[in-house]
Every structure is written in structure tokens, then in C-alpha cells.
Amino acid sequence: MKKYNVAILGATGAVGKEMLEILGERNFPINELKLLASKKSAGGEVEFKGKKYIIEEATENSFENIDVMLCAAENDISITLSPAAVMAGAVVIDNSSAYRMDENVPLVVPEVNPEDVKKHKGIIANPNCSTIIALTALNELNSYAKINRMIVSTYQAVSGAGINGIKELDKQVKDINEGKEAVANAFQYQIAYNLIPQIGDFDEIGYSQEEMKMQNEGRKILHNPNLKVNCTCIRVPVYRSHSESITIETEKEITVEKARELLNNAEGVKLIDDLQNKKYPMPIESSDQDLIYVGRIRKDISSDNSLVLWCCGDQIRKGAATNAVQIAEVLVKENLI
Amino acid sequence: MKKYNVAILGATGAVGKEMLEILGERNFPINELKLLASKKSAGGEVEFKGKKYIIEEATENSFENIDVMLCAAENDISITLSPAAVMAGAVVIDNSSAYRMDENVPLVVPEVNPEDVKKHKGIIANPNCSTIIALTALNELNSYAKINRMIVSTYQAVSGAGINGIKELDKQVKDINEGKEAVANAFQYQIAYNLIPQIGDFDEIGYSQEEMKMQNEGRKILHNPNLKVNCTCIRVPVYRSHSESITIETEKEITVEKARELLNNAEGVKLIDDLQNKKYPMPIESSDQDLIYVGRIRKDISSDNSLVLWCCGDQIRKGAATNAVQIAEVLVKENLI
């Protein structure tokens, strides 16, 4: 079996660490492994499958002989280093938002549009976490009856702000319990026991960047330029699973029974919808695994051809790291690296 | 100035305690005060305006000479004792859901439909907390352009389950921090660092009781039997303010500017909508006061004649106790007691 030289850029962050974990779990065929990070993090030691690796400082010269580079760095770092990796011959799977809307860059959720991988010109973008979670949940419904409109309210975990977000919730809860003041750095305000209705900056019509991603990325991934999405993104004091309350309007009716049947067989989805036994998706249960939990499926009593559902998915895993590794697996399967 | 004999039934609960607090704050003209609770809680001592009161056991004979009885008890207790209070000559303002949909019982948000108080036959019902918060936020918009459809996702505080809900979140966080298991009693599952998509039992089409209240009570309060509401109610680890992500479809367009103007002058509302300065409603800020904070107002980019907004309000105060005291104030103003 062919093996590949793999680099992770941003290997010390929440997503980068998880990418390594998932490459191991899924037995990705690795030949050589290179763990890259900022100068500050370089020199640290990481164990992977019984072997020790030293974190190296990422530079434009880090990518010789690399087949696939998983980028878990911020936009500015990705913009600096991803082209260098491509120039050196690597295929880059980029978790930043830098290239997502670039028409030369496929934006891929492997359960939804794996074939788009084939069009890559060096970079493949990993969608935004909330978008991945929603579209994995909705894909089979959209295939059955095209979704024209989505109304989404998110409940997003602190892991969306990386390790600092997780640490901040932890520290604030402890400080508040000890009667100290909660200090906010990773988020705009205290997140412990609070909700923050801002994720990213706002545009001139009052939507946050995170809110517009659902429509912009959704249109590209579903190949539906007419998809309309009204999204409200809220940060909640939950550690690592995002949840979403979703209403979809479809071009023809999907009955609740049909939706359950479709979701029961949907790739990447676990249907949890047994109300009599109080079974429904919850973020503590959907954490630390890869499936999107979907439930609370019901007819929208306020409109025809409209369904309501609730889904939860691990933000660091399927919302970022797992999706990126799955894209790498598609590259392997399609002999594209 | 005329003074009234006031009783609080359920005076030792979260809402009952707050009712007393608010009667004091707002200088409700009290002559005699009677604090009633279950046999278990009877005998306790409460101070109010420098005077000590003994909690008395509530019985059918507790209401002689009472002008107004504020009921903060559960449905079964209200059904047993509210009619006795009416028989004894009191007007009952009932925070339980027992009588809300009774056609002989007005259901009142004083900012929205104060005139309905006049139709009372002894009992006036206080609406559900999420309904009060949403309708206070939406009232002026609805007066300007009738709301035909609402799509609501709630983020509901643990105080909705009373003192036990508040204690449970507190205890779970402490237990988890000490490495112990979180025990769930007040809620179906752990609420610390989690979200629970169930508030009340589910009906046969998959909506929870709490979700249907928004449509059923909304229709009655707004005198709009055609109002359509698709609501998703989620419990979140926040102490005492409910938040709601709301999309409204109206019979004619409300521009964002018009909506801000209307809300800036709306009774019971505080407009907080200055995105450049990161000002928007948050539950920690809307707690311990009576206004409904409204912001994140924007055009729904997925539909015409549709607006999106975000609001937060203290569940125990405006969501329950303050609204009940405001109803009592309308009774006084209209010489109905």
C-alpha cells in the first residue's frame, strides 16, 4: 500500500492536535510525518504511534517531499505558507477560511460533495465548522428535495476559538466559583453562564462573518447558488460540540417519516429521535466522536414544505480535523496524491 | 391612596420570592400581606419593609379579605386553590399554565394587551416566560406591521425550573470541577456545559409543551388566531435570563431603521444594537432587571418582509414575577380591585 508524507501546520493547536489523533485512529497511510508550528511552539516533543516527533518551526522551506499538508493555522499563516507548500508539490487541505470562496479551490464535505476534490489546483478548503455540521445533517434531505431556504440558530462551543476558548471557559467558571471576576480574552465578554451573539466581525447589514459563511459556503458546497440562509450564530458555554436549530424549506414536501428514513441511512449521521424515551442530540453526547447527531425532526407548523430539526456535532473533530482527514482519504482513494 | 390586601401563594419559590421583592421595589400599595406556601415551608419567617411575616400553610380558607392573590404555585396547586381565592373575593393573577388557554381567563402582557384585564372573571393568567419575553420585544413591530409567522429558537435559563434548577447548575459545575459525576434531578440530563432540547413533554407531532405555548399563547395575547409559530426550546447553562433568536414575517416590510425606531420607543424594551461597539443583548446583562433587551436587528436575507432579531430578558422577573405585579398595577389603575 502506498504511503504518504504528511505535514500538519499548526500542530500544537486544538485542531492540529486532533488532526494527528485522527490520522492515527483512521490509520492514514503515513510514510513521513512533519509537525509544524510557530517559532514559539517549535522544539516541543509529540509522540505518535510509539515514535517521538519534534515540532519544527514552519517556514516556506518546510514542505519538500510533502504529499499532503493539513493546515490548521490561522488565515494569515495559511496565506503565507499554503502556496509555498503547493509550490513544493504538496496538496494542501486548509482549515482556515482564507481560500474557501476562491473559485479555484474546492470546498468539500466528503459526505456531500467528494467529487469536487478532483477539481483541486493544489489547495482544497475545509468548510467552516457550523457549515460542515449543518450540511452533513442536511445532505440526504437536500438530495431528496432541494433545500431553498434555511433558517439556522447556532449554539456554538468555546472550542471554536481553539484551546484558548476552552481554557477561558474553564478558568472563568473556577474564578466565578471562587468569587473572583471573570476575565475575557478569547471572547468579547464573559462566556461562563452567558451567551455571546457575536462570532466574527459584523458586515454592513448586521450579519457576522460566521453567519454569512452558512449561506456562502452552503451555496458552493451544495452547488446551489440560489440557496438562501438566514443564520444567527451564538456562542454558548459548552466545551466542544456545536448545536444547531434548523428550519428548512424544500421544493417539495419531505414527510417526517421520510426524513427519518433518509437520515437513518445518511453517511456521517446518527439519527437520535425517540422523544418518548427522551432521546435527542445533546452536545455532551456528540463530543469526542465523528458523527453528526440529528433529531427533534418535525413538520414546521408555520409553513408548508418545511421541516424543523436539531443537530449536534463535535466542532474540533467533524467540524474541522476529521473533515480534513476525510478529504485526504478521498485524495488517496482517487489517486490524487 | 387605597391600599390592598395581597397574598402570595408559593411565596418560598424562586418566582414567589421575586414577586415579594418586586411588590416592594415598585411600592405596590399593600395594606395586609399574606405569604402562603406548602405545609412543608410554613412557619418560616420573611422580612418585608422592616416587618416580619410568618409563612402560612395555604388552604382553601387562606383567602378571606384578600383583594389580589399572586399565584406562583404549580398547576395542581393553582387548580386547587385559585378558585377558592376567587370565591373568597380575590382577583387571582396566576403564573401557572393551568388557566392560560381558558377562554374565561385573560392572558396578559401589560405592554401588549392591558385592556384584556378588564374581561377577567376572577382569574388573570400570566403567560409563559418565553412568550412574555418574545411578545414584549415584538409588540411595537406587530402593531406597525402584523406578524404572520415567527420562527423562534430559545436559549432558556435554568431558573425556568425554579430554585432547584439554579441549584442544580451550581452543584453540577462544582461536582464536575472536583472530578465528581454530575447528578441530574431538576433536568432530564446534565445541564452544566450541555444543552437540553426538551422543556416540558412532547406532543404527538414532536413539539414540546413549551414550544407550543409560543404559538397558542401568542395567538391569544395578540388577538391573532392565524399567527403561525415554529418554536424550538432549548435549555442552556445560564442562570436566569432567557434569550431568543427570532425571525418574523410581517404583512408589510419593516425596515431595520423603522424597527430600531419602534423598539427605541417601545415600552418595556431596551434597544441594544450597536455592533461597531460590540453592543448587543446578553443574558448576564439582562438579568436582575425588568426590561427586555433587543438587538442584532437585521433584514432576513432569505425572505422578503422578514426581520431577524435577538432578545434577552430576566426569566424570573419580567418572565414571571414582574409581569404578574404589572398586571396587579393595571387592576389598581383601572379600579378593578
Image (tube, coloured by chain):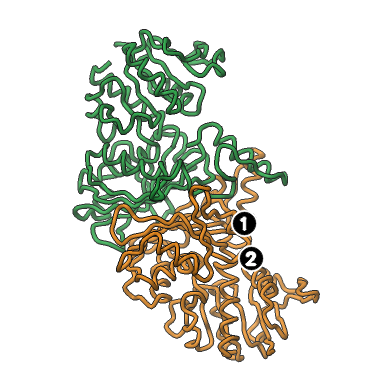
Chain colours: A green, B orange
Q: In which quarter of the image is residue B219?
A: bottom left
Q: Circle 2 is placed at which residue position?
A: B14
The residue that mark 1 highlights is: B166
Residue B84 appears in the rendering: no
| Residue type of the residue flagged with mark 2 | Ala
**B214 relative position to A259: left or right:** right
Classify 10 Å Cα crowding around label 2: few (below 14), some (14-19), many (20 and above). Answer: many
Look at the numbered disc 2 and give the secondary structure of its residue. helix
**How far from the left and from the top, in percent, is residue A45?**
55, 14
Q: Do the residues labelled 2 and 1 touch (CB within 8 Å)?
A: yes
Do marks 2 and 1 share a chain?
yes
Query: Mark 2 and mark 1: span between their CA atoms?
Result: 9 Å
x, y percent for residue A79: 39, 23
Residue shown at 45%/23% (left/top)? A21
Which chain does the residue under circle 2 lie in? B
B334 left or right of A245 in image: right
Query: Compared with residue B59, is residue A295 higher up or lower down, i.e. above or below?
Result: above
Residue located 41% across and 16% down the image:
A7
Kind of residue at badge 1: Ile
